[in-house]
Image: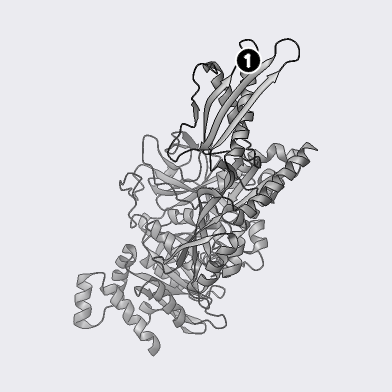
Amino acid sequence: MSVTAVENVRNFAILGHSGSGKTTLTDAIAFKIGLNDRLGLVSNGSSVSDITDEEKVRKISIFSSPFTGEYKLGGQSYKLIFIDTPGAPDFYGQLRGAVRAADSAIITVDAVSGVQVGTRRAWHICKSYNLSSVAFVITGLDKENADFHKTLDSIRDAFGVNCVPVTVPVAADKIVNILDTDTLPAELEDIKTSLAEAAAETDEALMDKYFSEGTLSAEEIRSGLLSGIAGGSVRPIYCVLSLKGTGMNEMLDSICRLLPGPGKRPLTDADGNAIPADPAAPFVAQVWKTAVDPFMGQLSYIRVFSGTLTNNMTVQNNGNGGKETVTTILQVNGKKQTGIDSAGPGDIVALPKLKNTKTGDTLAAVGTNTKLPEIDYPQPVTYMAVTAKTQADEDKISVAIHRLLDSDPTIHYEKQAATKEIILKGLGDVHLDVAVALMKSQSNVNVLLSTPKVPYREAVTGLGQGHYRHKKQSGGRGQFGEVYLRVEPLPEGETEWFLDETVGGSIPGNFMPAIQKGINETMLAGPIAGYPVQNVKVHVYDGAFHEVDSSEVAFKIAGSRAFREGMMAAKPVLLEPIMTLKISIPDTFMGSISGDMPHKRGRVLGMEADEDGVQVITAEAPLAELFKYSAELRSLTGGQGSFTMDFTRYDVVPGNVAQKIIAEAAKNRQEEED
């Protein structure tokens, strides 16, 4: 592709609710600008965007896919850079990276379903990343029960009356650009008026002319829209029949004329300094996605914000301070990878085999300390235990998981000491299923997922006395150590939990560390059900020793046994992790979700409507009841609900539940001993 002036670059992400036609629109654009010699289809696995086996089988987008092509308009050549993104909440992290890499967003809205939760989610993420240039594309107008006017109203109700159609359907198979059409059906004249009014409101001179003459020329309207769209005060709406190609030229023409190029979106680094979209400025880019290619290995996808990247250029990673040599620059269009000589502002390219670079890192010219803000990824909401199928898989599982983490920042990994399990955390059950498939394809590791054990804790609620005399005589030197202690709850805010309160030298000071060590080891597996003990305070107040037979080992044993006795006398309880949930749902599901919480031993703390009109329920529930909540919420809301989950505290397990847990723990211990 020839070098394109920065002002003729259009970089946009395609977002929307799952099933609203994002990938179909991507295929239609790719076909229209010659990236594919036939129209790809999701239904038969020929889409240029959904190219992995998992995407083809599930018929959903899992990964964000960038494309770059050329479009001719009025004798000028425009470079179109666009990113197809997943709509399913399980792959929300891919959406965030794509929005960081884009200058504009196009949100698809299905003409039958209208604005959905995923539509609002896409809108919200654009706002959170200050992506003010947002357009809407109404898809599916050829479906049964499709309604352009009803869909238009739903967009305006959700996102404001400054959402104005630029292309509209005038017949079943005809879509026109309002600004290129002299006569419109009577029912669309009001839409043309709203377009002129929106343009006039962006400029005082245009406003004066509109009030005085009652009309604006097409070029004047475009001028006003160009300013309004860049600033976020106007949001254009387009209509397409993607599978038929109807409305594609009208939409692409308008994108080139109206959407802003690089530099029109104000961009600053982490310190608030402006970053110019200037090919001659120092190079600055950010890694917004990392993928593992079966032939090239790790690919780091970058968005160039400033300067020019060339082959064999050395850049510095301002995330970790290291340096990388760029040996190859790839322009990626689906399965096709093309080597190019350079990349400038607005470009999205892939760099293979960077040694120590991860998603979110800023790459810059050597000597340039610019660092872009981190990409904010959602926290996991679904936890699963991972076990290897064979010993060979066990040996490779750690490497496979870390390779997975490098390519997906929304996957988290934890070795749970209390339960001795490896926990994989993600944004949903489908997300983790895909992660397992990737471990197989990337690292040839076979693993099984299962419901994790809950990391319970043990604590005390009262005061208990403990005493143990360790005395052993079997010929030769004996063992002797005696400890008296008290166990009680550790007051909130205190950190000193082990106190030596002995007097008169009943226990020499050199044996106190051994007593504390014995207690520490016992706290790793408490006396109730073998879970770690927390928030206890221990007072060692008396004891006895023998000048010859006492030893550190003897006092370690005495301290351990005395603590166990004292804890059992101090009204011990089992604690469980309590999570705070923020559940986002449409109004119609409020009753179902609120009514479901008590069945999970949870409680609703409050309800409110967020700024995008979605209802948000704040609730608390034990982690033990939430391992399958992602799938349950999807079932309850028909896929329209989403939630976040954060640990808030440990709380006492109810007696009837605790009895079952303690009995299960005793059974497991017995099986291990047998």
Dot 1 corresponds to which residue? 550
**On the picture, is 160 further left or further right than 627?**
left
Looking at the rendered structure, the kind of residue marked 1 is: Ser
Residue in the picture at 60% in, 38% down: 569
Residue in the picture at 41% in, 55% down: 4
Q: Is residue 75 above or below residue 466?
A: below
> Is residue 9 visible to the viewer in this orientation of the structure?
no
Percent coordinates x, y for residue 585 in the rendering: 50, 67
Q: Is residue 313 above or below residue 171?
A: above
In this rendering, the count of numbered labels is: 1
Q: Element under label 1?
A: loop
Residues 347 and 393: in front is 393
In the picture as drawn, the residue positioned furthest to the bottom comes out as 186
In the picture as drawn, the residue positioned furthest to the right comes out as 674
Percent coordinates x, y for residue 576 in the rendering: 57, 48
**On the picture, is 322 further left or further right than 198?**
right
> Is residue 4 visible to the viewer in this orientation of the structure?
yes
Percent coordinates x, y for residue 527 in the rendering: 64, 38
Residues 594 and 584: in front is 594
